[in-house]
Amino acid sequence: MATVLLLRHGRTTANATGGLAGHRPVELDDTGRDQARRVGGRLRALPLAAVVTSPLIRCRQTVELALPDVVPAVDEGLIECGYGDWEGRPLKELAEDPLWPVVQQHPSAVVFPNGEAMAAMSARAVATIRRWDAKVTAEHGTDALWVACSHGDVIKAIVADAMGLHLDEFQRIVADPASVSVIRYTPTRPFLVRLNDTADLSALVPPKKADGQAADPASQSDAAVGGGAGAGV
């Protein structure tokens, strides 16, 4: 079957300030626009059979900057998780909410207040990717490559499914802004070909504290809900 390149949108103003965008019309910041252009240079070298995007503007902007000659299909199935009352709030504030440790350790049980269940987000995202992959395969053959532009938690859920992981393990996965994760589906099982590929190893350098000391890894054990701004930012 075909191979999907899962593209996360570039950095947004919400990512940069530590907020949770959710379904809000948050746009790319200058860094995110640069990220989209850079990843576009890599994507344009490929014979892409299809490009599909979440309807949210940060994904549509990413595709427009990365692949300016492409008119993508828009699919609601790739939209960000509906965080409900959490949307628009700072992550530091949300970390004090009693629901936060459940999001971190048992996300399959989470239903966001006035929002979506994380299990429902995972199910509709995986179903959307598999439906599109079957469509691209039928129309363009098993060697076809295609792009799906979506959001951090959505991509993590799709990758977890491909790896045969329970949703409760998906917070162990990282999907940085403008990263590409690649899955090749087959009749019997998927293969994870690339994960969180940005072709920028400088992001692996731990961020520094104000005093110049490396940040304590123990203080960073929680996953960034929504995907975060990326390592090294």
Image (cartoon, rainbow, N blue to C red):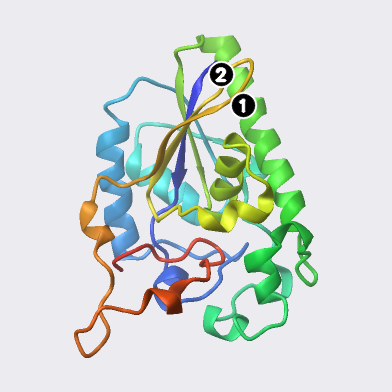
Picture quarter containing residue 177?
A: bottom left
Viewer-nearest residue: 18 or 74 = 18
Q: Residue at x 56, y 68 (%)?
A: 21
Position of 113 with respect to 74 (left or right) is right
Q: Amino acid at mark 1?
A: Trp
- Tell me whether circle 1 and circle 2 mark residues in contact (CB < 8 Å): yes
* Residue 117, image x, y percentages: 77, 58
Q: Residue furthest front?
A: 218
Q: Residue at x 61, y 81 (%)?
A: 94
For the N terminus, the image quarter is top right
* Residue 32, image x, y percentages: 34, 59
Disc count in the image?
2
Q: Which residue is mark 1?
A: 132
* Residue 124, image x, y percentages: 72, 42
Q: Which residue is mark 2?
A: 136
**Secondary element at tag 2:** helix
Rendered view: 154 above or below 148: below
Q: Residue at x 67, y 55 (%)?
A: 168
Q: Crowdedness of circle 1 by 10 Å Cα count: few (<14), some, many (20+)?
A: some
* Residue 217, image x, y percentages: 38, 73
Q: Crowdedness of circle 2 by 10 Å Cα count: few (<14), some, many (20+)?
A: many
Position of 181 with respect to 25 (left or right) is left
Q: Residue furthest bottom?
A: 211
| Mark 1 and mark 2: Cα distance apart in space | 6 Å
Q: Residue at x 46, y 65 (%)?
A: 228
